[in-house]
Image: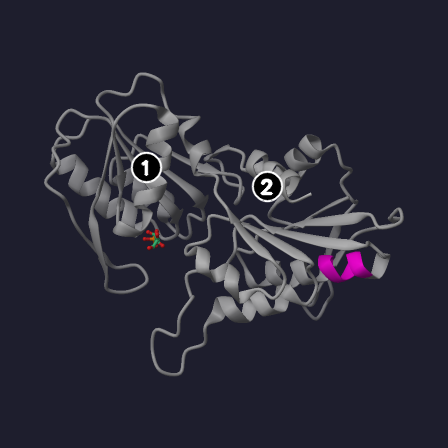
Amino acid sequence: MILSGRHSQSIAAELAERLDEPLAPVAFDRFPDGELMASIGDVTPADGERAIVVASTPSSDAHIELLQLQDAAHEAGYGEVITVVPYLGYARQDQAFEQGEPVSVRAVARAISTGADRVLTIDPHEEDVCDFFDPPATPISAAARLAEPLPEDLIDPLFLSPDAGAIDLAETVREAAGTGTVDYFEKTRHSGSDVEISPSDTSVDGRDIVVVDDIIATGSTMSEALTILQERGANRVFVTCIHPLLAGNAVTKLSRAGVDTVYGTDTLERPCSAVSAAPVVADALADQL
Ligand code: R5P
């Protein structure tokens, strides 16, 4: 049985089809005092049946609903609860960067651990975050899927990571596309929305560029990279990421910076979610059985 979180309807439906498992009639409600209620409906598990909770956590409410779904699954008597977190919120807060700060993703992981027998998450910012979970937690990658929506007529393509952290993702997308070269820029972050990009020497003049990152949040990283690419005479610039969070004015920021098309996966459901990460989740679940 698949139990879908509020922000993971499409990926859960696709996963249900691939695994040939039913979707529970999950319902979401809010009490007058603001408290949430995610319920899984009138389900009767067979002996030892597993429940697969599929819930991205882009908001604090989503974290609570995930915990509620896990708890409801235990309450209903499922033999095993596998939690798939397509987009794990707080994953970038994986250290106490300053005195007095929490390791927020560790706190989140500990809470999820109380109700999960296994955890899978897609392209977390750093794979090490999986060590914060008590049950076995596996990072899986949907990066190869990002090549799928790209046009077939790319001109001398360069797959570019806007900072050193996403080089492997760029390399994976290039491999899946079967053509092009890989490079990366250097990034200095001054604040949550203020970043400085130092370009490499690679020529981009007249080339199609595919910029690859794990997440677009405020769009600052991508728009800085786009501005440099435009100044240096790039042809078309495609922006692709695993998690299209696209907070605030990120979409217009990218548009103003001259992007041709933005692509993401359905770890977060956005108009640009051109490709599903469900196949890699289905494969990972099959491998673990
Ligand atoms: C950070 O290292 C990540 O890989 C992304 O580059 C970053 O989180 C994107 O954030 P924003 O869109 O706010 O620049």
- Three-letter amino acid code at disc 2? Ala
Tell me: 153 left or right of 215.
Answer: left
Examine the rendering and report whether any part of residue 91 can be seen.
no
Say above or below: 76 vs 2.
below
Relative image position of residue 251 (x, y in whole percent): 37, 43
Instruction: Tell me the quarter of the picture where residue 204 sits.
Output: top left
Would you say the magenta stretch is mainly helix, strand or loop? helix
Judge by depth and name the residue closer to the eye, 27 or 139: 139
Q: Horizontal and vertical percent for residue 101?
A: 41, 78
Picture quarter with the C terminus: top right
Using the image as rendered, state which of residue 230 and residue 70 is in the foreground: 70
In this view, 283 is above or below 195: above
Residues at circles 1 and 2 in contact by the CB criterion of under 8 Å: no
Determine crowd level at label 2: few under 14, some 14-19, many 20+ residues with C-alpha closer than 10 A. Answer: some
Amino acid type at mark 1? Glu
Query: In the rendered structure, which segment of residues is drawn in magenta?
Result: 69-74
Residue 236 picture location, percent across and down = 25, 27
Residue occupying the point 53% across, 66% down:
132
* Residue at 67% over, 31% down: 18
| Magenta stretch contains residue 231 | no
Q: Is residue 73 magenta?
A: yes
The residue pinned by badge 2 equals 284
Disc ID at residue 171: 1
Query: CA–CA distance between discs 1 and 2?
Result: 21 Å
